Amino acid sequence: MNLSHYRAAGALRDGTPIIIRAIQPDDDEALREGFRLLSDQTIYQRFFQAKRDLAEHELRYLTQLDFVDHVGLAAVISNPAGEFIIGVGRFVRLGSGRAGVRGVERDRTPAHAEVAFVVGDEFQGQGVGSQLLAHLVVIARDLGIRYLEAEVLPENRPMIAVFRRSGLPITEAVHEGVLHVELRLDGSQEERVGSGVGARVRPAAAAPDGGPGETGPA
Ligand SMILES: CC(C)(COP(=O)(O)OP(=O)(O)OC[C@H]1O[C@@H](n2cnc3c(N)ncnc32)[C@H](O)[C@@H]1OP(=O)(O)O)[C@@H](O)C(=O)NCCC(=O)NCCS
């Protein structure tokens, strides 16, 4: 499968159809515009710092992906006016010489990747984060990644809920006020049965997607 053309169907809790698709280089303007719409709290939970804009080099980093060491998916709603990005999820393989999801290099083996998400404020709590994680897990396994890690603020209950409900073996540890979560992807078949992840992913097609989104988060 050509992961840079990854595309799958999904839905919000209210039944609204969404597409989960690979982030493209020409999503840069949509991500920038969407970022400007995010609340301060959402930005802080994603980047651990206050931020009002994304710099050019950050936009390049977030959209020019190799789909080997850095994989990113956008959740989009299509309507007659165009395509609207409502959330993104990504992982960056650690030990690959790349900076992690917050631009900080972390020392791990390439079997580890760091994962991060952001969903537009008005679309949070509708299953987008969970569906993005489910697809990222399938792709990560395909790329030989065995652990997905995340740094989460301990008060970020929705993110913690998404990880805990994934059905994957999970370890959690608090270090310097940040919760470190590690999901194990290479569990036995028994551990995978009934996993929320497997249950939520529909087969993806390697179809080209419909062009640049209008707006969306980072
Ligand atoms: C964290 C985030 C990515 C989750 O995405 P999402 O689309 O909102 O997640 P989902 O709808 O799939 O699931 C959220 C879960 O948290 C639960 N939840 C929501 N608010 C909650 C709260 N205050 N306390 C406890 N659980 C809460 C929801 O009920 C849901 O669980 P359920 O499916 O069992 O009902 C999204 O909320 C977000 O972008 N937050 C800001 C940025 C961020 O925190 N990024 C993570 C950095 S690693």
Image (cartoon, helix red, strand yellow):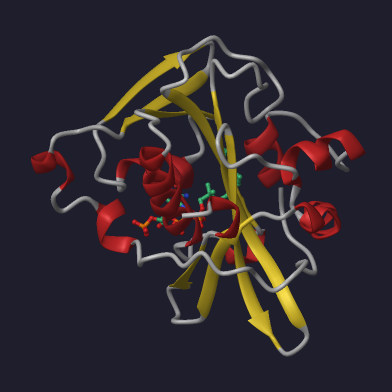
Place residue 140 in its image quadrant.
top left
Q: Residue 201: x percent and y percent? A: 35, 61
Residue lying farthest to the front in this orientation: 1
Occupied quadrant, residue 112: top left
Q: Which residue is pictured at 77% across the width and 57% down the height?
A: 27
Question: From the viewer's perspective, is 213 left or right of 127?
Answer: right
Closer-to-camera residue (170/159): 170
Query: Where residue 162 sits in the image (x, y, percent)?
Result: 40, 47
Left/right of residue 139 with respect to residue 119 in the rendered view: left
Furthest toward the bottom, the residue is: 80
Q: Quadrant of residue 145?
A: top left
Q: Is residue 159 left or right of residue 82?
A: left
Residue 78, above or below 41: below
- Residue at horizontal 87 percent and vertical 34 percent from the top: 57
- In depth, the one of 126 and 199 nearer the eye is 199
Question: Could you say where residue 28 lies in the image, as x and y percent from the top left?
Answer: 82, 53
Viewer-proximal residue among 44 and 7: 7
| Towards the viewer: 170 or 138 | 138
Please give left or right for residue 189 compared with residue 165 in the image.
left
Q: Residue furthest left?
A: 190
Q: Residue at x 43, y 53 (%)?
A: 135
Q: Residue at x 63, y 25 (%)?
A: 100
Whether residue 156 is situated above or below residue 1 in the rendered picture: above
Report x, y in % for residue 80.
73, 90
